[in-house]
């Protein structure tokens, strides 16, 4: 029996989702002052580092934006980029006087935010940080709609797709003669099918995603592949999807449009005279039918479970935070020593035991 055949297609496990979400935020008249305070905070931190003899270009710089801590990532494409301390999202701010054709704020949701907190809670959280400087209009720039499948899909090859769209390049990336990724199409509308576990191996996201899959009924000992449509603004606007809200309201319908536009077909029914009449593969039908909204709009409970299982905070996390605090102590010439640290440690233990 081939490795992709299963006895009952209805038993095939899938998890529908939005794997990537990028968008802009339209700003109001308060933004110039807001941006100036960010510039000031950055400059102050850089000057302090220089006074202490540190290289400000490579040192970790942390600033607070509306009582939320961010690490500074540097400047790219005209934006000053920051990452939220828990790595939930990245956000970029630009000078309102430069490149007037672009919005002043860009947001990129990250894996921690999407899979631990969830889109439903993460976007309002970002809105609350920016509430005094934005209008609420959030033009979308990219969304990846995806379905994780508990099945080895490496059997798929270039001959198994049927599409009426033009310029649908189909290419397969191999590693040791095994399918690593298959690509169909190109930006702004691209399908990727790849081995998700192979992508996650030895990365910082692996623990989070392993927990996520297990919480959704997957076995991490079995294959996990990702079927993912990468959609950019140019493509999204052809379906009148302009904002983040438009996407969330129409995600299921849009996914159906995508999966119908690029069909995986049953190879045994393909005819040279008209391959488009070939039957859709049962796996493709299952993926289409199982794509629902409720599965990927998380409610934030996963993050609490991660905390309870002490997944979200381990010795490496403590080491990173401690080093950051130690740097600040040195920058401000605070009289920190081992006796003081032990006293603080004992004080915290007593508070916890109360």
Image (tube, rainbow, N blue to C red):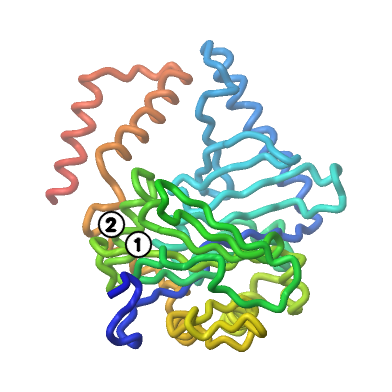
Q: Write down the quadrant of residue 254 in the picture.
A: bottom right
Up-down: is 143 above or below 32? Answer: below
> SS of the residue at dot 1?
helix
In this view, the residue in front, 121 or 326, is 121
Say which residue appears at 63% left-offset and 55% top-offset: 107
Label 2: element kind: helix
Q: Residues within 10 Å of mark 2 (few under 14, many from 20)?
A: few
Mark 1–mark 2 contact, CB under 8 Å?
yes
The residue that mark 1 highlights is 303
The residue nearer to you, when weighing 102 against 237, is 237
Cα distance, mark 1 to mark 2?
Answer: 6 Å
Quarter of the image for residue 168 reads bottom right
Q: Which mark is residue 307?
A: 2
Give the residue drawn at x 59%, y 58%.
171
In the visual, does 198 lie left or right of 27?
left
Q: Residue at x 23, y 61 (%)?
A: 221
């Amino acid at each position: 029996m081939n490795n992709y055949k299963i006895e009952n297609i209805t038993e095939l496990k899938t998890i529908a989702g939005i794997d990537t979400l990028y968008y802009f935020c339209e700003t109001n008249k308060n933004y110039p002052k807001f941006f100036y305070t960010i510039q000031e905070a950055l400059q102050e931190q850089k000057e302090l580092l220089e006074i202490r003899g540190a290289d400000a270009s490579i040192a970790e710089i942390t600033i607070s934006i509306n009582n939320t801590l961010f690490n500074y990532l540097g400047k790219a494409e005209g934006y000053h980029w920051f990452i939220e301390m828990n790595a939930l999202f990245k956000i970029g701010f630009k000078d309102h006087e430069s490149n007037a054709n672009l919005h002043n704020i860009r947001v990129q949701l990250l894996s921690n935010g999407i899979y631990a907190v969830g889109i439903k809670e993460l976007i309002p959280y970002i809105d609350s940080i920016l509430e005094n400087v934005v209008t609420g209009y959030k033009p979308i720039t990219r969304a990846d709609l995806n379905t994780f499948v508990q099945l080895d899909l490496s059997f798929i090859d270039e001959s198994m797709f049927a599409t009426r769209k033009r310029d649908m390049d189909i290419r397969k990336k191999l590693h040791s003669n095994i399918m690593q990724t298959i690509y169909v199409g190109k930006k702004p509308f691209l399908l990727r099918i790849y081995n998700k576990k192979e992508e996650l191996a030895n990365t910082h996201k692996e623990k989070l995603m392993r927990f996520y899959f297990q919480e959704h009924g997957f076995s991490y000992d079995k294959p996990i592949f990702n079927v993912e449509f990468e959609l950019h603004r140019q493509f999204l606007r052809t379906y009148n999807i302009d904002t983040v809200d438009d996407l969330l309201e129409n995600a299921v319908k849009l996914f159906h449009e995508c999966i119908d536009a690029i069909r995986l077909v049953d190879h045994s029914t393909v005819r040279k005279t008209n391959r488009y009449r070939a039957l859709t593969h049962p796996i493709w039908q299952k993926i289409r039918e199982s794509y629902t909204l409720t599965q990927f709009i998380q409610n934030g409970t996963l993050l609490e479970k991660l905390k309870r299982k002490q997944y979200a905070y381990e010795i490496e996390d403590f080491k990173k935070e401690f080093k950051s605090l130690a740097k600040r102590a040195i920058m401000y010439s605070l009289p920190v020593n081992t006796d003081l640290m032990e006293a603080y440690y004992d004080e915290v233990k007593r508070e916890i035991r109360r």
